[in-house]
Amino acid sequence: MDTDEIKNLPVHVAIIMDGNGRWARQRNLPRVQGHMVGMESVRDIVTTTRKLHIPYLTLYAFSKENWSRPKEEVQGLLELLEIYLEKELPLMMEEGIKLNILGDITDFPRRIQRRLQEAMNKTKKNKALWLNIALSYSARKEILQAVVAIAEAYKRGTIKRINEGVFKKYLWTRQIPDPDLLIRTSGEMRISNFLLWQLAYTELYITDTLWPDFRKEAYLEALKEYSRRDRRFGSIKEA
């Protein structure tokens, strides 16, 4: 697909990367194999986003609830995360990609916490693409921690009134705009505790394609569909 066909690109794309396990099961492979191939999709989508000059990309990689998965699978995911950080950091530096983590990184082993922090520190001055990776993420926890922090600030007198603008400043995404487009792979019709506040007026795109098969062409098709939509933000526009 010619990218020139896409006239109206989003500023911020969020993706729920779903279907790795199903992809592996369909091929009688271990689930971790699906996650490994899924890493290739991550690289393809990140590099395509960078080439299209879309400034923000958020990938839902590991939810708070995912810790309850079988220990073998969780361990495999942690190992893949370390591999990803080591392998992709040179690309991030070369392409001007800033890495940011959304979620509770303290849930991870200290070794991985250090690697995550090092990667964020090394890329913090990069400006071409802001890449958020949601790890041990829960939107409900994000909202609750914001409420607690706001209540404490209000009690101290640090803030005098509470509105949407104030609330946003206490979210983990406070420095970036809300997503314009949410893509979910594997055909599931739910948002799975992901960016519940931020997705209020986000355009949704659901594809049956499993994440390991979701590559550049499928991504461009989603962006093309987005470019055809008329975003209303709750208002009524005359035809």
Image: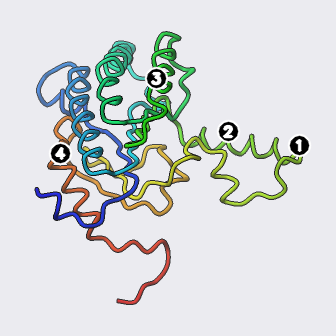
Label 3 secondary element? helix
* Kind of residue at disc 2: Gln
C-alpha separation, residue under disc 4 versus residue under disc 3: 30 Å
Tell me residue 147's x, y (percent): 71, 45
Tell me residue 68's x, y (percent): 45, 23
C-alpha separation, residue under disc 1 versus residue under disc 3: 36 Å
Question: Residue at point 20% right, 21% down?
Answer: 33
Tell me residue 153's x, y (percent): 81, 44
10 Å neighbourhood of mark 1: few (<14), some, or many (≥20)? few
* Kind of residue at disc 1: Arg
Question: Residue at point 43% right, 44% down?
Answer: 192
**Which disc, if any, is residue 67?**
3
Residue placed under numbered mark 2 in the picture: 145
- The numbered mark, 4 or 2, whose residue comes first in the sequence reads 2
10 Å neighbourhood of mark 4: few (<14), some, or many (≥20)? some
CB under 8 Å between discs 4 and 3 = no
- Most foreground residue, 229 or 123: 123
* Kind of residue at disc 3: Trp
- Most foreground residue, 166 or 50: 50
